[in-house]
Image: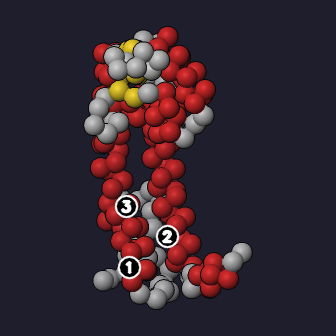
Amino acid sequence: MSRNSNRFSETLGKEDYEMLSSFRYALRRFLKFSEQAAAARGLTPRQHQALLAIKGYPGRDYVTNGELAERLQIHHQSAVGLVNRLQRMGLVERVAATDDRRKSYIRLTRQGADILEQLTAAHKRELMTIAPHLELLLRHLQKSQDSPPQHAEVGGHARWDGQSSEDVPIKPE
Protein backbone atom coordinates (compact mmCIF):
# COMPACT_ATOMS: atom_id res chain seq x y z
CA MET A 1 0.00 0.00 0.00
CA SER A 2 1.28 3.45 -0.80
CA ARG A 3 1.71 6.12 1.81
CA ASN A 4 -1.16 8.15 0.36
CA SER A 5 -3.62 5.26 0.58
CA ASN A 6 -2.59 4.65 4.22
CA ARG A 7 -3.14 8.30 5.02
CA PHE A 8 -6.56 8.23 3.33
CA SER A 9 -7.56 5.07 5.18
CA GLU A 10 -6.86 6.71 8.52
CA THR A 11 -9.56 9.33 7.86
CA LEU A 12 -12.26 6.74 7.21
CA GLY A 13 -14.78 6.10 9.91
CA LYS A 14 -17.25 3.28 10.45
CA GLU A 15 -19.91 5.43 8.80
CA ASP A 16 -17.88 5.48 5.57
CA TYR A 17 -17.72 1.69 5.45
CA GLU A 18 -21.41 1.42 6.20
CA MET A 19 -22.22 3.90 3.42
CA LEU A 20 -20.14 2.03 0.86
CA SER A 21 -21.57 -1.28 2.00
CA SER A 22 -25.10 0.08 1.68
CA PHE A 23 -24.36 1.50 -1.75
CA ARG A 24 -22.96 -1.81 -2.99
CA TYR A 25 -25.97 -3.59 -1.50
CA ALA A 26 -28.36 -1.30 -3.39
CA LEU A 27 -26.43 -1.89 -6.62
CA ARG A 28 -26.45 -5.64 -6.08
CA ARG A 29 -30.21 -5.63 -5.46
CA PHE A 30 -30.67 -3.74 -8.74
CA LEU A 31 -28.43 -6.20 -10.57
CA LYS A 32 -30.40 -9.10 -9.13
CA PHE A 33 -33.61 -7.48 -10.32
CA SER A 34 -32.04 -7.00 -13.76
CA GLU A 35 -30.88 -10.63 -13.96
CA GLN A 36 -34.35 -11.89 -13.00
CA ALA A 37 -36.10 -9.57 -15.47
CA ALA A 38 -33.84 -10.75 -18.30
CA ALA A 39 -34.35 -14.40 -17.37
CA ALA A 40 -38.13 -13.91 -17.38
CA ARG A 41 -37.81 -12.92 -21.04
CA GLY A 42 -35.49 -15.79 -21.93
CA LEU A 43 -32.24 -13.82 -21.89
CA THR A 44 -29.02 -14.05 -19.96
CA PRO A 45 -27.87 -10.83 -18.28
CA ARG A 46 -25.11 -10.44 -20.89
CA GLN A 47 -27.60 -10.84 -23.75
CA HIS A 48 -29.76 -8.12 -22.21
CA GLN A 49 -26.70 -5.90 -21.75
CA ALA A 50 -25.76 -6.46 -25.40
CA LEU A 51 -29.21 -5.41 -26.63
CA LEU A 52 -29.03 -2.30 -24.47
CA ALA A 53 -25.49 -1.49 -25.61
CA ILE A 54 -26.58 -1.72 -29.25
CA LYS A 55 -29.71 0.40 -28.91
CA GLY A 56 -28.07 2.84 -26.50
CA TYR A 57 -24.87 3.43 -28.45
CA PRO A 58 -24.27 7.21 -28.63
CA GLY A 59 -25.40 8.80 -31.88
CA ARG A 60 -26.72 5.66 -33.58
CA ASP A 61 -28.59 2.42 -32.98
CA TYR A 62 -26.03 -0.05 -34.31
CA VAL A 63 -22.51 -1.11 -33.31
CA THR A 64 -19.52 -3.01 -34.61
CA ASN A 65 -18.31 -6.15 -32.85
CA GLY A 66 -15.40 -4.16 -31.44
CA GLU A 67 -17.66 -1.44 -30.06
CA LEU A 68 -19.92 -4.04 -28.47
CA ALA A 69 -16.94 -5.79 -26.92
CA GLU A 70 -15.73 -2.49 -25.48
CA ARG A 71 -19.15 -1.55 -24.09
CA LEU A 72 -19.53 -4.96 -22.41
CA GLN A 73 -15.85 -5.11 -21.41
CA ILE A 74 -15.40 -8.53 -23.03
CA HIS A 75 -12.99 -9.91 -25.61
CA HIS A 76 -13.77 -9.39 -29.29
CA GLN A 77 -14.26 -13.12 -29.89
CA SER A 78 -16.67 -13.33 -26.96
CA ALA A 79 -18.70 -10.52 -28.55
CA VAL A 80 -18.76 -12.43 -31.86
CA GLY A 81 -20.13 -15.52 -30.11
CA LEU A 82 -22.69 -13.45 -28.22
CA VAL A 83 -23.89 -11.81 -31.44
CA ASN A 84 -24.10 -15.22 -33.12
CA ARG A 85 -26.38 -16.48 -30.34
CA LEU A 86 -28.53 -13.34 -30.41
CA GLN A 87 -28.79 -13.64 -34.19
CA ARG A 88 -29.95 -17.27 -33.92
CA MET A 89 -32.58 -16.09 -31.42
CA GLY A 90 -33.80 -13.53 -33.96
CA LEU A 91 -32.93 -10.56 -31.75
CA VAL A 92 -30.15 -8.94 -33.80
CA GLU A 93 -29.02 -8.84 -37.39
CA ARG A 94 -25.73 -8.12 -39.08
CA VAL A 95 -25.78 -5.55 -41.86
CA ALA A 96 -22.85 -5.05 -44.22
CA ALA A 97 -21.27 -1.61 -43.96
CA THR A 98 -21.60 0.39 -47.17
CA ASP A 99 -18.31 2.24 -46.62
CA ASP A 100 -16.15 -0.82 -45.84
CA ARG A 101 -17.16 -4.27 -47.06
CA ARG A 102 -14.95 -5.94 -44.43
CA LYS A 103 -17.05 -4.42 -41.68
CA SER A 104 -20.56 -5.24 -40.54
CA TYR A 105 -22.89 -3.51 -38.17
CA ILE A 106 -25.08 -5.15 -35.57
CA ARG A 107 -28.55 -3.81 -34.96
CA LEU A 108 -31.68 -4.99 -33.22
CA THR A 109 -34.48 -6.74 -35.05
CA ARG A 110 -38.07 -5.76 -34.31
CA GLN A 111 -38.29 -8.70 -31.89
CA GLY A 112 -35.07 -7.63 -30.15
CA ALA A 113 -36.31 -4.03 -29.92
CA ASP A 114 -39.64 -5.16 -28.43
CA ILE A 115 -37.97 -7.28 -25.73
CA LEU A 116 -35.52 -4.48 -24.92
CA GLU A 117 -38.35 -1.96 -24.66
CA GLN A 118 -40.14 -4.16 -22.12
CA LEU A 119 -36.95 -4.66 -20.11
CA THR A 120 -36.03 -0.98 -20.24
CA ALA A 121 -39.48 0.08 -19.00
CA ALA A 122 -39.19 -2.37 -16.08
CA HIS A 123 -35.67 -1.15 -15.28
CA LYS A 124 -36.76 2.49 -15.30
CA ARG A 125 -39.55 1.67 -12.84
CA GLU A 126 -37.09 -0.17 -10.58
CA LEU A 127 -34.58 2.69 -10.76
CA MET A 128 -37.29 5.15 -9.78
CA THR A 129 -38.00 2.95 -6.76
CA ILE A 130 -34.40 2.86 -5.55
CA ALA A 131 -33.38 6.37 -6.69
CA PRO A 132 -34.20 8.03 -3.33
CA HIS A 133 -31.92 5.54 -1.55
CA LEU A 134 -29.08 6.03 -3.99
CA GLU A 135 -29.47 9.80 -3.78
CA LEU A 136 -29.23 9.64 0.01
CA LEU A 137 -26.08 7.56 -0.16
CA LEU A 138 -24.48 9.79 -2.78
CA ARG A 139 -25.40 12.92 -0.83
CA HIS A 140 -23.81 11.37 2.23
CA LEU A 141 -20.67 10.57 0.25
CA GLN A 142 -20.47 14.13 -1.05
CA LYS A 143 -21.01 15.54 2.42
CA SER A 144 -18.27 13.32 3.83
CA GLN A 145 -15.88 14.67 1.18
CA ASP A 146 -16.74 18.26 2.07
CA SER A 147 -16.17 17.91 5.81
CA PRO A 148 -14.20 15.71 8.20
CA PRO A 149 -15.93 12.45 9.13
CA GLN A 150 -18.40 12.73 11.96
CA HIS A 151 -19.49 9.67 13.83
CA ALA A 152 -23.22 9.38 14.25
CA GLU A 153 -25.21 7.42 16.72
CA VAL A 154 -26.54 4.08 15.53
CA GLY A 155 -29.10 4.70 12.82
CA GLY A 156 -28.05 8.33 12.37
CA HIS A 157 -26.58 8.04 8.90
CA ALA A 158 -27.63 7.24 5.36
CA ARG A 159 -27.83 3.58 4.60
CA TRP A 160 -30.03 1.38 2.52
CA ASP A 161 -31.26 -1.92 3.79
CA GLY A 162 -34.41 -2.36 1.73
CA GLN A 163 -36.46 0.08 3.81
CA SER A 164 -38.40 2.87 2.19
CA SER A 165 -36.65 6.23 2.08
CA GLU A 166 -38.94 7.50 4.84
CA ASP A 167 -37.64 4.75 7.11
CA VAL A 168 -33.97 5.52 6.51
CA PRO A 169 -32.71 8.00 9.10
CA ILE A 170 -30.04 10.46 7.99
CA LYS A 171 -28.12 13.15 9.75
CA PRO A 172 -29.80 16.53 9.71
CA GLU A 173 -28.07 18.94 7.36
Q: Amino acid at mark 3?
A: His
Q: Amino acid at mark 1?
A: Lys
Q: Secondary structure at mark 1?
A: helix
Circle 2 packing at 10 Å, graded few (<14), some (14-19), many (20+), is many
Q: Of the residues under marks 2 and 1, which one precedes in the sequence? A: 2
Q: Position of residue 147 (x, y in %)?
A: 41, 87
Q: CA distance from mark 2 to mark 1?
A: 12 Å
Q: Position of residue 116 (x, y in %)?
A: 35, 27
> Can residue 104 be seen from the camera position used here?
no
> Can residue 173 be seen from the camera position used here?
yes
Indicate which label's residue lies in the foreground, 2 or 1. 1
The residue at 50%/39% (across/down) is 70
The residue at 45%/47% (across/down) is 30
Residue 143: mark: 1
Whether 115 is drawn above or below 153: the answer is above
Residue 19: mark: 2
The residue at 45%/20% (across/down) is 103
Looking at the image, do the residues carrying marks 3 and 1 touch, with CB atoms under 8 Å apart?
A: no
Depth order, front residue of 59/156: 59
Q: Is residue 159 left or right of residue 171?
A: right
Location of the N terminus by quadrant is: bottom right
**Colour scheme shown:** secondary structure
Name the residue tied to disc 3.
Answer: 133
Location of the C terminus by quadrant is: bottom left
Residue 1: mark: none
